[in-house]
Image (cartoon, rainbow, N blue to C red):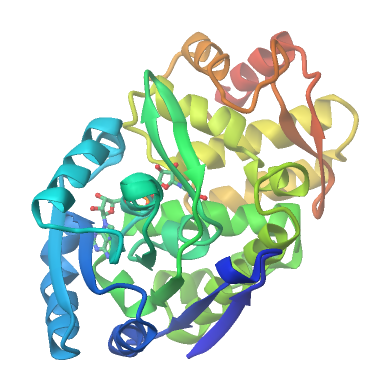
Amino acid sequence: MKTLRVNLPRPSVSYDIHIGFGILDRGVFMIARSGWGRDYTVVSDERVFHHHGRRLMGLLADMGLAAQSVTFPPGEASKTVETALAVARALAAQGADRSSALIALGGGVVGDLTGFVAAVYMRGIPYIQVPTTLMAQVDSAVGGKTAVDEGGAKNILGVFHQPKAVIIDLELLETLPPREFVNGLAEIVKYGIIEEPDLLDLLEANRKALEDRDRDFMTTVVSRSCRIKKGIVEIDEEERGVRRVLNFGHTVGHAVEAASGYVIPHGEAVAMGMAAAAGLSERLGHLPREDRERIVRCLTSLGLPVALPAGVETEAVMEAMKRDKKKEGERINFVLLKRPGMPFINGGVPPALVREVLEEGRS
Ligand SMILES: NC(=O)c1ccc[n+]([C@@H]2O[C@H](COP(=O)([O-])OP(=O)(O)OC[C@H]3O[C@@H](n4cnc5c(N)ncnc54)[C@H](O)[C@@H]3O)[C@@H](O)[C@H]2O)c1
């Protein structure tokens, strides 16, 4: 088992990320030793709970921990204030109080929503992330960003609330459908693009290992991803500066998700957004053409989409971008590239050029 420490300016909110294969029992042992909660509520979606809930509840009981569970339907459509309210009501009905703690068992939807409830329930209770998608293991479970969607805008209600620990058991990915697995690869590609370009070559050269979900290879790429993310979060916990580069591909990506009615999954939408951001970077004279092509090639070779699909109108994406919470007045902040590994923030991209790049991508 590998352990990475997320060292934050306030030492009291620093925490460990544990990564390994078949480590859930050790994770629960650590929870039992920690004293984070007098009792625990496992929050999950119905699909994840069906696969892994009973086992986790059993391990908690074996450790003598009082534990209950709350579930909701899977999917982004559940990441709402209504679901958060339903979870909070269930917690209240179960008698959860300030000495209780939550365990988020699931993908990014479960993690973001559980963190949000933990942040506001009785003005804040502890929570632990047990991510079950590749997306959540390499990205959303780390960093303390919690949120729900509202009114067609992604993550519009949210708060920073760091977990007490992140327990990444790669074995939990065994039940993950292939499309969801590929979805998570998008965020790993993102780390390659913004921070360590050799990751792009590593992914491309090891497609077979990825397909087989090879244990050693998965441990390497998940650990590298978490190390990159934690490094950025440590410098800029609340996204006032450098953390913004983690949004590479997300301006268009979030708009695509919203414009598709959340039918297109986050990672696929971000892949389209990364191709668009690379296209904008090239068109604005920052990024050499061969670097854009390298990015597009890497995404495509991993099975990720790089263009808007037929059912999603360019205008709907442009409209959704106006609701992006990262915009400042009329300016939409884009993360652009000078080169792989050299991102920068640009708030002055003309909408007409964005429209053009999105349209070009379709052909
Ligand atoms: N907080 C952050 O920093 C951050 C970063 C990236 C993404 N996100 C958010 O994460 C969300 C996307 O996360 P996601 O891609 O994990 O989606 P998700 O949570 O909706 O999970 C995808 C699907 O996989 C199923 N699933 C999860 N684990 C499984 C398993 N082990 N076996 C079988 N099925 C399983 C779920 O039931 C769901 O149907 C978005 O809302 C996005 O905004 C947040």
Whether residue 46 appears in this view of the structure is no
Residue at the (32%, 59%) spot, across then down:
178
Closer to the camera in the image, 96 or 298 = 96
Horizontally, residue 207 falls left or right of residue 280, namely left
Residue 143: name its quadrant: bottom right
The quarter in which the C terminus is drawn is: top right
Give x and y (percent) for residue 215.
43, 84
Closer to the camera in the image, 84 or 336 = 84
Q: Is residue 111 above or below residue 215?
A: above
Q: Is residue 264 above or below residue 71?
A: above
Residue 289: name its quadrant: top right
Closer to the camera in the image, 129 or 268 = 129
Whether residue 344 appears in this view of the structure is yes
Residue at the (64%, 20%) spot, across then down:
360
Give x and y (percent) for residue 235.
76, 59
Residue 273: name its quadrant: top right
Horizontally, residue 265 falls left or right of residue 227, namely left
Give x and y (percent) for residue 261.
33, 24
Closer to the camera in the image, 76 or 104 = 104
Residue at the (73%, 50%) spot, across then down:
294
Give x and y (percent) for residue 326.
63, 28
Horizontally, residue 151 falls left or right of residue 228, namely left
